Image: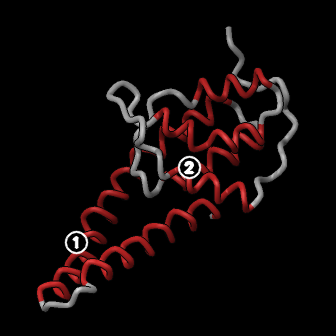
Amino acid sequence: MASNHYEDVTEAPDLQQKQLRILVWRSLLLQASFNYERMQSAGWLYSILPGLRHIHKNKKDLSKSMKDHMEFFNTHPFLVTFIMGVILAMEQKKEDREAIRGIRVAMMGPLGGIGDALFYLTLLPITAGIGASLGVEGNPLGPIVFLISFNIIHFGVRIGLMNY
């Protein structure tokens, strides 16, 4: 029977700011390998893999962790960095693998719904409406205002949640 604990239980050092920025950029590819069996799991593993490599120096522990993170995963792509931060903090402390899995599963559903409501049903119509109203008035900056305003908030949330 497989153990729920890692072989090397020494806590890993904290991730540096540069490493956190890399994780944020990798999170943009969360849905790049989307499939209907495991949804975003391959993109999820790709996103957190540099963090896992930093944390797990023992190859068997890294392998166990990677296998755990290839299970079904589906959440809102803009809020995924919050889950990444929590999970990597738990991995860093070498928490029980079932506890890590449970937290990941418990967070992905609610954040998926919250993200849809915040971004696709609120922020997108507001920023698109502002850009469209400028465009209808003949202002060529309408689409640019939309793209800049939407993405300032989008990337601000992504980066802010990863550092939080």
Q: Nearer the viewer, mark 1 or mark 2?
A: 2
SS at badge 2: helix
Residue at 69% x, 23% y is: 63
Image location (x, y in percent) of residue 121? 24, 64
Is 100 left, or right, of 156 in this rendering? right
Residue at 59% x, 27% y is: 68
**Residue extending furthest toward the front:** 140
SS at badge 1: helix
Q: Which residue is mark 1?
A: 125
Q: Earlier in the sequence, mark 1 or mark 2?
A: 2
**Residue type, numbered disc 2:** Arg
Quarter of the figure that contains the N terminus: top right
Q: Which mark is residue 26?
A: 2
Quarter of the image for residue 145 reads: bottom left
Residue at 17% x, 84% y is: 135
Q: Residue 122, relative to residue 2: is it above or below?
A: below
Quarter of the image for residue 81 reads: bottom right
Is 62 left, or right, of 150 in this rendering? right
Image location (x, y in percent) of residue 79? 46, 56
Which residue occupies the foreground of this view, 103 or 8? 8
**Residue extending furthest toward the top:** 1
**Residue type, numbered disc 1:** Pro
Query: How was this image coloured?
Result: secondary structure
Q: Residue 14, relative to residue 53: is it above or below?
A: below
Mark 1 crowd level (few <14, some 14–19, many ≥20, 10 Å Cα): some
